[in-house]
Amino acid sequence: MTNIAILGSTGSIGRSSLEVIERFPGRFRVTTLTAHRNIDLLREQVACFRPDTVVVSDERTAEALRHHVNGHTAVLTGDDGLIEAVTRPEVDVVVSALVGFAGLTPTLRAIEAGKDIALANKETLVVAGDLIMRAVREHGVRLLPVDSEHSAILQCLQGEDAKGVSRLILTASGGPFRDMPWEHFSGITPAQALAHPTWRMGSKITIDSATLMNKGLEVIEAYWLFGLPADRIEVVVHPQSIIHSLVEFVDGSIKAQLGIPDMKIPIQYALTFPERGPSVSKRLDLVSLGTMTFFPPDMERFRCLGLAYQALRAGGTAPAVLNAANEVAVQLFLAEKISFQDIPGIIEDALAGHTPLMEATLEDLVRIDTQTRTAVHQRRAVVE
Ligand code: MG
């Protein structure tokens, strides 16, 4: 029996993870659920999975929840509660599905406590790839990607020698504005940007997909997970989202992983790795699919992708600055404070004002994240 803690259980990945876990009752047990404030869904999840511990953001939500859970489940709060919950001895695997920078500290603490990680929170590796990968080696834990592209690459690499790999090719759907002329970008509304053509996901990652920043973050994530330099990690736009990524080998062979766009498939692979288990996800029907198409990414309309490569090449804390500025820009866009085409400029300005620090500690990264967020808000206040 594998005991699983889910960080972010009421989000899209958290809900899909519970659907997977439910199908393997003799194999997985949910010990821990954490959520922000979606108390109604969390109550249902607690009733269904009977975890030992739940964690919510604040004491008021915790009080409300305590009225509904029986004595079996402890209710904790805040960052301290989160860290206490993921480091408990009974936890074997942590599904890290918080959104953004908030996922970093609990994921790092879980690794330090010897827990295996199923990683959906790509920002953790973007911000702190060096720190995280060193902790993974030092504590001998397994870090398995939940992100569909990285799951695809991991699957393609099984049975292969790292020396035989020539490049990684990440596929991107291209998002809802793939064919929209640049002149129309200023009129893009949050509702349009939230309507992703192939994947159903949370709002942060959906906006990142529309700007192609999501693919940029995934290039950085791939760099840390698979250890290839930036110039051997490529992106190709593939609107059908059927090939989830590819690996090219030195002999010119390419392996790809295909499937319908359903996050339950990569989540299950991360949880059952290296085995495969049966799944109720729909099957890919190649004949009804008929055609798959591929395009180069347009780096002029989607500047965020180029900025992510730039931050990766600059190294050190540059990706942490990229991430912080992007998180603020996405919030501002969703709040209708800036336009869609303002997003890359905000990130570019933040990177331009930063001299990367190499071998940063967690404290350095927290400080740089906070400083970057403050600087973005201050610069905007000056402009207004
Ligand atoms: Mg992805």
Image (cartoon, helix red, strand yellow):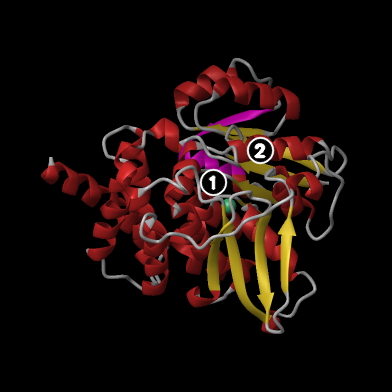
Q: What element does badge 2 sit on?
A: strand
Horizontally, residue 209 falls left or right of residue 278, namely left
Report which residue position mark 2 lands on: 32
Residue 148 lies, with reference to residue 195, above or below; the image says: below
Q: Is residue 80 magenta?
A: yes
Residue 118 in picture, x, y percent from top left: 66, 53
Marks 1,2: beta carbons within 8 A = no
Residue 323 in picture, x, y percent from top left: 39, 55
Report which residue position mark 1 lands on: 83
Classify residue 156 by image quadrant. Answer: bottom right
Crowding around mark 2 (Cα neighbors within 10 Å: few <14, some 14 to 19, many 20+) is: many
Q: What element does badge 1 sit on?
A: helix
Give the residues in magenta: 73-85
Image quadrant containing the C terminus = top left
**Res 310 visible:** yes
Residue 125: assigned label: none
Q: Nearer the viewer, residue 325 or 179?
A: 179
Residue 202 in picture, x, y percent from top left: 52, 37
Q: Choose the circle earlier in sequence order: 1 or 2.
A: 2
Residue at 74 percent across and 63 percent down: it is: 155
